[in-house]
Amino acid sequence: MKGLLIFSSVVLPLLMFLMAKKWTTLSFIFNLVALLSLLIFGNIASISIYKIIRDSTVFMTNIHAIFLNPFFLVTASYLGLYVIYLLLNLILKND
């Protein structure tokens, strides 16, 4: 499983870069999905922290429940891939 995660963190951003180079509208779509992912990710995190503060519960044990939220995990993983894609775009772009 670790190997799959490492492999996909290298291959998927590279595929994103190559596909965006071939189809220019994909760059816009990748950016739009990243914006939506950031909004969802940030809202889930802030709502979870607000609930912990509101309920005066133990922070360290309750905050880890956020990792059980599939929307949080999917958006966070896309944002990680997107950042690598952006770095590849900066490094490999030939203008």
Image (cartoon, rainbow, N blue to C red):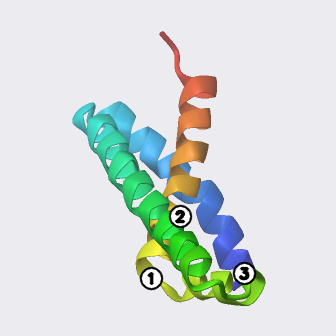
Residue found farthest to the top: 95
Q: Position of residue 83 (x, y in %)?
A: 57, 44
Q: Choose the circle earlier in sequence order: 2 or 3.
A: 3
> For the residue marked with disc 3, what is the amino acid?
Phe
In this figure, which residue is indicated by the disc labeled 1? 70
Q: CA distance from mark 1 to mark 3?
A: 20 Å
Q: Residues within 10 Å of mark 1 (few under 14, many from 20)?
A: few
Q: Nearer the viewer, residue 44 or 81?
A: 44
Give the residue type that dot 1 points to: Pro
Provide the residue designation for mark 3: 59
Front-most of residues 34 and 55: 55
* Residue found 40% across the figure and 49% down from its top: 34
Element on which disc 1 rests: helix
Q: Secondary structure at mark 2?
A: helix
Seen at 36% across and 37% down, the residue is 20
Q: Amino acid at mark 2?
A: Ala
> On the rendered structure, is 37 left or right of 79?
left
Label 2, label 1: how far apart the Cα atoms are: 10 Å
The structure residue drawn at horizontal position 53% and vertical position 21%, both measured from the top left corner, is 93
Marks 2 and 3 in Cβ contact (< 8 Å): no
Q: Is residue 37 above or below residue 60?
A: above
The count of marks equals 3
Left or right relative to 84: residue 82: left
Question: Does the residue at mark 1 contact the one at mark 3 (Cβ under 8 Å)?
Answer: no
Question: How far across and down, in percent of the image, does residue 73 sit?
Answer: 51, 75
First in sequence: mark 1 or mark 3?
3
Q: Is residue 18 above or below residue 64?
A: above
Q: Which residue is mark 2?
A: 76
Q: Quadrant of residue 77?
A: bottom right
User: Tag 3's secondary structure?
Assistant: helix
